[in-house]
Amino acid sequence: MREVHEIERRLAARLAELRAARGWSLDDLAAKTAISRSTLSRIERNEISPTAGLLGRLGVAYERTTSQLLAEVEAESPELLRAGDQPVWRDESTGFTRRMVSPPQAGLRAELVEARLAPGADIRYDEPAVPGLEQHLWMLDGTLELTIGSTKHVLRTGDCLRFRLWDRTHFHNPGVLSARYALTLVRP
């Protein structure tokens, strides 16, 4: 649990650094993300942990995927990342868990993530953090309703959906069991 708190502390500091590097005030960032100034301030002071949705909106503002934001605050990754050492991030409020399976490396474009959505979980992203991001979503267990723009896909165990992300997305687990999937992200 200590590692989780350390990652959250470093994430808060990194988000404050990114804003400062752009010369944005909290009001500027609030206008870009539709996140209240007070919430942004509390995130940067590590008083609260951002939800998956908030982290997604911050990623859009900073032109980074959620994985990239999280990778920037983790220790330098080796080429081999053992299962027990793979960083896990949880959004308790939405029932979303994200495990960074592949070690993030500067200069490489692809990453592999394992995600879990609790039964009934519902996450929306208004726009992609990186427009044109290629994604391959492979359902490992359960059912996932993924809406990209206005197109809804119902994915079940073993299904794989390949797409480029240009529009808003909505992830929903309509089942009574967790939905678990592997997601490969390839930056343009």
Image (cartoon, rainbow, N blue to C red):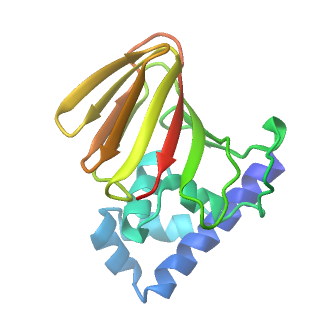
In the image, what residue occupies the spot 71% across and 51% down?
A: 103
Percent x, y of residue 85: 81, 44
Identify whether 59 is placed above or below 148: below
Task: Please identify the quadrant where the C terminus is shown.
Answer: bottom left
In the image, what residue occupies the spot 38% across and 58% down?
A: 129
- Position of residue 101 in the picture relative to residue 146 (left or right): right
Residue 48 in sight: no
Identify whether 164 is placed above or below 117: below
Q: Nearer the viewer, residue 126 or 112?
A: 112
In the rendered picture of this protein, how many numbered marks are placed on residues? 0
- Position of residue 100 in the picture relative to residue 155 (left or right): right
Task: Please identify the quadrant where the N terminus is shown.
Answer: top right
In the image, what residue occupies the spot 41% across and 48% down?
A: 53
In the image, what residue occupies the spot 81% across and 56% down?
A: 78
Percent x, y of residue 41: 49, 71
Identify whether 78 is placed above or below 97: below
Residue 160 in sight: yes
Residue furthest to the top: 176
**Image quadrant of residue 32?**
bottom left
- Position of residue 30 in the picture relative to residue 67 (left or right): left
Residue furthest to the left: 150
**Image quadrant of residue 155?**
top left
